[in-house]
Image (tube, rainbow, N blue to C red):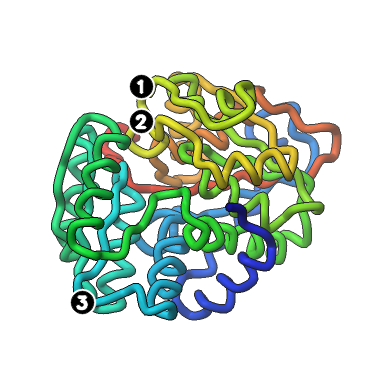
Amino acid sequence: MTVTRDDVDAAMARLAGQVRRTPVLAVDASTVADGPSWVTGPLWFKLELTQHTGTFKARGAMNRLRSAAEAGELTDVGVVAASGGNAGLAVAWAAARLGVPAEIYLPTTSSAAKVRRLSTLGAHVVQVGREYAEAYEAATERAAATGAAFCHAYDQPAMVAGAGTLGVELWEQTGGVDTVLVAVGGGGLLAGVAAALAGRARLVGVEPVGAPSLHAALAAGGPTDVAVSGLAADSLGARRLGQIAYDVAVRCAVTSVLVTDDDLVAARRWLWDRYRLVVEHGAAAALAGLLAGAYRPEPGERVAVVLCGANTDPTDLG
């Protein structure tokens, strides 16, 4: 099971007019006093935090539901999803757009802000366990019992291909990049963008030391369970990298770097202080990889950082 550029192109057509073409911000790192001195080439931020529901997940969710409708899998029973929060928001949003009910399973550690937003989208919310894996098990059982279409948060071809449309946009908006830094949880965004840009740009996955799903999978030769902890566990807390993400990562020679919780806090604060951009800790991971020097570009290297989500409590940024 894998995803290719053809799948991403099909998703582009399916999502036309359904999701936002999010902006790209050109950044001159040399003008920022505390910016990364090792960034000497062009730098862009892909502002996916401005997407519907506040994250890139809207792309995959809408692609999955529209694909299911085309295949006759989407009925009045609706959809079931498991999520740390963001995927659930996206599925609830897409289901509301298509007029079908959504039942979303979350771990009890999900932020209160995400739970409130799910309710405002009309979803039925069920909180189970402390980790995504426990919510996932309950959701799959529910989908099997009811016949609802199941939406995997990251390891489903339509979800991955939908996320990959971000990469196509990024390439068009920048005129081409050498490297894209992406935060990694289950790996759906990484896999989609890597598939979209295969043969044109390198992908660097950035993940917290407390949730190293990609790092562990590349070391082990396949997805393997990892312990999950830390500030970004609600969005990057997948216990195991998706199989699709692993297959695409190997095919596209994706690399992995790790950052600390302190790095996440610093990157999130830096974005607010310098650009008044509010992102969640998980979304700050991609930039943290650059600011902390976990990834250091070559001289003149064209780098893009995906800021993938903004579902956070902003009260600690002032």
Location of residue 305 in the rendering, given as x and y in whole percent from the top left corner: 61, 44
**At numbered mark 1, what does the secondary structure look like: helix, strand or loop?**
loop
Can you tell which quarter of the image residue 215 is in? top right
Location of residue 145 in the rendering, given as x and y in whole percent from the top left corner: 18, 57
Is any atom of residue 34 visible in this view? no
**Label 2 CA crowd tier, 10 Å (few <14, some 14–19, many 20+):** many
Which residue type carries mark 3? Asp
What residue would you read off at disc 1? 229
**Label 1 CA crowd tier, 10 Å (few <14, some 14–19, many 20+):** some
User: Of marks 3 and 2, which one's residue comes earlier in the chain?
Assistant: 3
Is any atom of residue 149 visible in this view? yes
The image quadrant where one finds the C terminus is top left
Callouts 1 and 2 close, C-beta under 8 Å: yes
Residues 1 and 218: in front is: 1
Callouts 1 and 3 close, C-beta under 8 Å: no
What residue would you read off at disc 3? 76
**242 in relation to 174, above or below:** above
Which residue type carries mark 2? Ala
Q: Nearer the viewer, mark 1 or mark 3?
A: 3
Taking the spot 34% from the left edge, 34% from the top edge, the residue there is 317
Residues 241 and 286: in front is: 241
Taking the spot 31% from the left edge, 37% from the top edge, the residue there is 132
Location of residue 240 in the rendering, given as x and y in whole percent from the top left corner: 45, 32
Location of residue 11 in the rendering, given as x and y in whole percent from the top left corner: 56, 70
Residues 169 and 123: in front is: 123
**Tag count:** 3
**284 in relation to 55, above or below:** above
